[in-house]
Amino acid sequence: MHRSTTTALFTALAAAAALAVPAQAAAPTVELQPDRLTRGADIAVPHIEEGDFVDGERRVELPGTVASVIGEVADGWLVGTNNVDRNRNRRVVRVAADGSVTDVLRNLDTSTVVLSADGSTLAWQQYVSGGRKTITYAYDVATATVTGEKGPGPYVTLLDVAADRVVLGAGQRVLQWRPSTGRQRTLVKKAAGSVSIEHDLLSIYTRDPYAGGCTKLVRLSDPGQTVWKSCRDRIAAFSPDGTQLLTFHILTDGVGPGEIHLREVDGTKLATWTTNWFSGWEWESPGTVLLDVNGERRSATVRCVLAQCEDATDPVKVQAP
């Protein structure tokens, strides 16, 4: 595996980002083309490579042919796997520190699975009645028991989960469901975007973005408290510490955005990254972002701390979307 001395540099840059950029300085814009960047350290967080679970030097073969990392739990990592057709070999497995793989759940749509920030609780959904209705489940990871079931009912979107709290999007409403009691209440009568129960953040739309609607970031505990508003961008992800956002154009659709912004939680722009299109994004650590970059000729996962960017995987020929 390729290693680089830039690991320490990127860690230092992430820790000192606020000090490194004067408040009055314009946020940098960086065009990302993987074949023009230097090769840095490999991806530092657990991820999937060619269907295998990779964590540093450890590589674990998984069942199925398609996989995605769900998140960390007390005794390992949860991974969703399935075959290419998504209808066979569907399961959630636990990858332990010793490399062993055990089934946690089977026969579910792994794309709907959400893990709480503390790794204690899972939630997932089952679509019934031809996709017109949903059943939402809550599950205690430690005891391996279903703690609640909601539905079947009108279609809802699973947004986030905590120990005894599930946040759902239901058209022009954001709902909170308590699995232990079965009680449900409306938090706000707006369409939902991204949610973080851990950081008390909720993005909503003032109305349909195609009809001039805007993104509003509010406190989940008090939706009347606005943190930031934008009529241009929508929120793609919150940083692990809840202090930063990734955003892109509010009407982005199709293959993915060609421009992503890094912002403070109040919307202050810290950096802009551009390329032909981005097919994925995640946080390697607070202040350090991993971007799946599809450039003119090459694609790679690129690591960025503000304007300092490097390849975290070897560039390969870009594939048509």
Image (tube, rainbow, N blue to C red):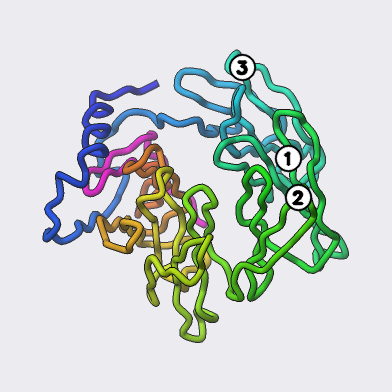
Residue nearer the viewer, 12 or 178: 178
Label 3 and label 2: CA atoms lie apart by 33 Å
Amino acid at the residue labelled 2: Pro
Amino acid at the residue labelled 3: Gly
Is residue 255 among the parts visible in the rendering? no
Give x and y (percent) for residue 84.
70, 43
Do tag 3 and tag 1 residues touch (Cβ < 8 Å)? no
Q: Is residue 320 magenta?
A: yes
Going from N to C along the chain, the mark reached first, 2 or 1, is: 1
What is the crowding at mark 1: few (fewer than 14 residues within 10 Å), some, or many (at least 20)? some
Q: Residue under circle 3? A: 99
Residue 258, located in which quarter of the rendered image?
bottom left
Say which element carries label 3.
loop
Say which element carries label 1.
loop
Going from N to C along the chain, the mark reached first, 3 or 1, is: 1
| Highlighted magenta segment, given as a residue range | 303-321
Q: Specify the farthest residue to the right.
A: 129
Give x and y (percent) for residue 62.
66, 27
Do tag 3 and tag 2 residues touch (Cβ < 8 Å)? no
| Residue 160 relative to residue 251: left or right | right
Q: Residue under circle 1? A: 83
Q: Specify the farthest residue to the bottom.
A: 211
Q: Residue under circle 2? A: 179
At x 55% / y 41%, what residue is drawn? 117
In the rendered image of this protein, does residue 206 appear above or below residue 220? below
Give x and y (percent) for residue 16.
20, 39
Label 3 and label 1: CA atoms lie apart by 21 Å
In the rendered image of this protein, does residue 220 appear above or below residue 164? below
At x 58% / y 17%, what residue is drawn? 97
Q: Is residue 172 magenta?
A: no
- Per the rendering, the mark at residue 57 is none
